[in-house]
Image: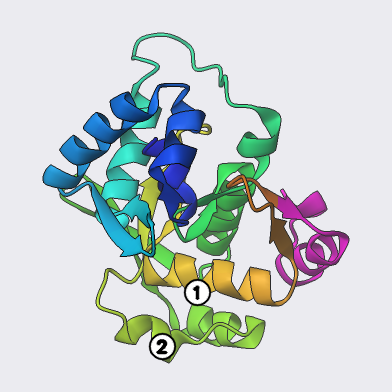
């Protein structure tokens, strides 16, 4: 149920019960515990109660737990479905093969510089990066004004490498949706890179095929 909420959308208890393939009473008991633990927020609207993740920190923890679930010491082979592995929404930023490729491209171009902060990887924007993101159409001032970390590495559960999280990652996904570089189905967090998106990523970033 928690993983299904990582697309940033709200769902009813009935929908979450169907996703988890459990009865309504079982789902209700779990949701009460999740709400008590502040992992989900609930909003009452009419006769319905809508649940969503309580914040970005919860989404980040879920992504890390998913990455660790396969254990260590074994060669990594992803079991993620292809449509989710290619590109998906990790709450409000781009994850999957495309998300990782974007983050790696930004660092290789010198737009972002990485440094460690505790156990996290944090990114700073270079002057050339600021010009480049503005040229793409990213509103950096609005991203900086948000009450959250600006840019950090979010461990990708299907790739076991970092994709771009934080306010900058959210602004990038917002731009990609607005420009129709990616589309998202209503019932899935999978993202589909459009033909326009592939051309733009190739022309502007040098990413072949949007990956």
The residue carrying mark 1 is 171
- Quadrant of the rendering where the N terminus is positioned: top left
Question: Of helix, strand and loop, which one carries label 1?
Answer: helix
Pick the front one: 190 or 21? 21
> For the view shown, which residue lies furthest in the left direction?
36
Q: Give the range drawn in magenta.
A: 192-211
The residue shown at (33%, 25%) is 68
Q: Position of residue 121 (x, y in %)?
A: 30, 52
Give the number of the disc on residue 61.
none
Cα–Cα gap, marks 2 and 1: 9 Å
Q: Does residue 101 sit above or below 138 in this rendering?
A: above
Q: In this view, does 30 lie to the left or right of 135?
A: left
What coloring was used for the rendering? rainbow
Q: Position of residue 117 (x, y in %)?
A: 19, 55
Q: Earlier in the sequence, mark 2 or mark 1?
A: 2
Specify whether residue 115 is in view. Answer: no
The residue carrying mark 2 is 142
The residue shown at (55%, 87%) is 131
């Amino acid at each position: 149920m928690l993983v299904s909420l990582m697309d940033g959308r709200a769902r009813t208890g009935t929908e979450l019960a169907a996703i988890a393939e459990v009865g309504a009473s079982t789902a209700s008991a779990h949701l009460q515990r999740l709400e008590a633990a502040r992992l989900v927020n609930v909003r009452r609207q009419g006769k319905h109660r809508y649940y969503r993740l309580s914040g970005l920190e919860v989404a980040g923890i879920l992504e890390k737990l998913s990455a660790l679930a396969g254990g260590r010491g074994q060669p990594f082979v992803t079991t993620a479905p292809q449509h989710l592995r290619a590109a998906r929404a990790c709450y409000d930023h781009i994850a999957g093969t495309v998300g990782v490729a974007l983050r790696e491209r930004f660092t290789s171009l010198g737009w972002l510089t990485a440094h460690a902060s505790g156990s996290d990887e944090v990114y700073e924007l270079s002057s050339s990066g600021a010009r480049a993101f503005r040229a793409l159409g990213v509103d950096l001032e609005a991203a900086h004004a948000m009450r959250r970390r600006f840019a950090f590495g979010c461990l990708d559960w299907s790739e076991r490498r970092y994709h771009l999280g934080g306010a900058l990652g959210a602004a990038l996904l917002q731009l990609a949706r607005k420009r129709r570089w990616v589309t998202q189905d209503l019932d899935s967090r999978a993202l589909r890179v459009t033909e326009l998106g592939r051309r733009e990523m190739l022309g502007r970033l040098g990413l072949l095929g949007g990956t």
